[in-house]
Image (cartoon, rainbow, N blue to C red):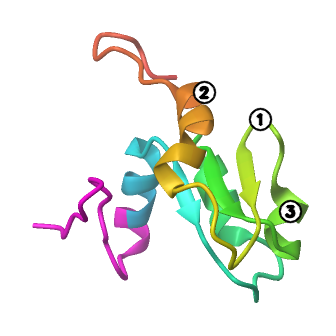
Amino acid sequence: MDPVDEDGIDVLGIVTNEVRTHELSTAKVAVQPSLGGESFGLVLAEAFACATPAVASDIRGYAAVATPESTVLVPPGEPGPRAPDAAAPAAAQKGTPPDDTPHG
């Protein structure tokens, strides 16, 4: 069983590519609270490939791939909105199709 914190956020740690893709595909939002060191923002591109919006630090690599429709950027290392609060607008855009809706 995956550890879950008090806000209901799954803490997965290191996972295989297959597990990562599955988790991103079913997630309402990806949260990337990096302080720096992301030269391209590959983790955001992976989330977007799974049609998952993101809340991410406003650092060069993430800002380069972020769009207003897909990402909420927040200042790195500064106290601010809690991830679930910041994620709400982005997660609302994803929506979840009913089980009987064809997935294309």
Say left or right for 89 vs 29.
right
**Disc nearer the start of the sequence (3/2):** 3
Task: Give me the disc on residue 93.
Answer: 2
Q: What secondary structure predominates along the stretch shown in magenta?
A: loop
Which residue is at a point 76% across and 82% down the rendered structure image?
38
**Percent coordinates x, y for residue 92 in the rendering:** 54, 27
| Looking at the image, residue 72 lies above or below residue 102 | below
Q: Do the residues labelled 3 and 2 touch (CB within 8 Å)?
A: no
Crowdedness near tag 2: few (<14), some (14–19) or many (≥20) residues, C-alpha within 10 Å? some
Task: Examine the image and state in which quarter residue 81 appears.
Answer: bottom right
Residue 86 is one of the magenta-drawn residues: no
**Percent coordinates x, y for residue 10 in the rendering:** 29, 61
Which residue is at a point 80% across and 66% down the rendered structure image?
58
Q: Can residue 50 be seen in this view?
A: no
Q: Are marks 1 and 3 in contact (CB under 8 Å)?
A: no
Say left or right for 100 vs 78.
left
Which residue is at a point 38% across and 55% down the rendered structure image?
23
User: Where is mark 3, residue-wise?
Assistant: 63
Task: Give me the disc on residue 69.
Answer: 1
Q: Do the residues labelled 1 and 2 touch (CB within 8 Å)?
A: yes
Crowdedness near tag 1: few (<14), some (14–19) or many (≥20) residues, C-alpha within 10 Å? few
| Magenta extent | 1-19
Q: Which amino acid does label 3 sit on?
A: Ala
Alpha carbon separation for disc pair 3 and 2: 19 Å
Alpha carbon separation for disc pair 1 and 3: 13 Å
> Residue pushed farthest bottom?
37
Crowdedness near tag 3: few (<14), some (14–19) or many (≥20) residues, C-alpha within 10 Å? some
